[in-house]
Amino acid sequence: MNRLARHATRLGLLGLLMSPPSLQASAGMLPIDDFARSSGPASQALSNFGTSWRVVTDTVMGGASSAGMDFTTLAERRCLRLAGTVSLENNGGFVQASLDLAADGGSFDASQYAGIELDVYGNGESYNLHLRTADTWIVWQSYRASFQAPPGWRTLRLPFGGFEAYRTRAPLDLRQLKRIGLVAIGREMQADLCLGRIAFYR
């Protein structure tokens, strides 16, 4: 062990010095889910917030879209996969994998973070990330940001300042964030989106 390493050991920093750059870069981030320890059905596995992902489609409003969600391994990486068909029949048009940020139905204060970082692998389609707060009590209200999901792993950052309010005049209140959702919406398409990691970043 060299002198720098011995000094780092005394300061409790050896793990940081020896960690890969990707781990060092994650300092200051708050992981939401990375699926590394998830087992069993995706709907029963717990995120770092103690909540589970669930599939929501437009059938709750009379639509005809369909989707499923499960764990898989893609390009040697474990991930949550949302796959299905988005239909515009009966005024529908979305499928979604959503996650509550408080197990008791409450909210999470994300005001000290700048946005959301996610690792995605898709089919080249455009998808949305939706945020819901205590102010979005009607089902179609949300704050939305779009992203492309290429056929290969890609790390994306979506700053909170880039989210647009949808059918609500209330500004995005990060102190009362309740739910996040990965959504295929607005047009007929085959949804196939894998999420390898999602976190808040500063």
Image (cartoon, rainbow, N blue to C red):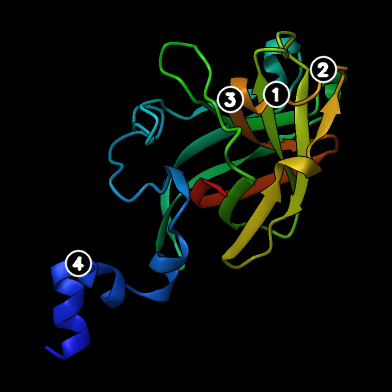
Crowd rating for badge 4 (residues with CA inside 10 Å; few <14, some 14–19, many 20+): few
| Residue kind at label 2, given as amino acid type | Ala
Above or below, 21 relative to 137: below
- Please name the residue shown 75% across and 11% down the image: 62
Residue that mark 2 sits on: 170
- Under tag 2, what secondary structure? loop
Residue closer to the observer: 2 or 19: 2
Horizontal side of residue 197 vs 136, given as left or right: left
Residue 147 seen in the figure: yes
Above or below, 133 relative to 39: above
Name the N-terminal-most of marks 2 and 3: 2
Q: Give the distance between the C-alpha atoms of the residues marked 2 and 1, in whole angstroms.
A: 8 Å
Name the N-terminal-most of marks 1 and 4: 4
Residue that mark 3 sits on: 179
Q: Where residue 154 appears, x then y in whole percent?
A: 61, 64
Name the N-terminal-most of marks 3 and 1: 1
| Residue kind at label 1, given as amino acid type | Asp
Residue that mark 1 sits on: 173
| CB-based contact (under 8 Å), mark 3 and mark 1 | no
| CB-based contact (under 8 Å), mark 4 and mark 3 | no
Name the N-terminal-most of marks 4 and 3: 4
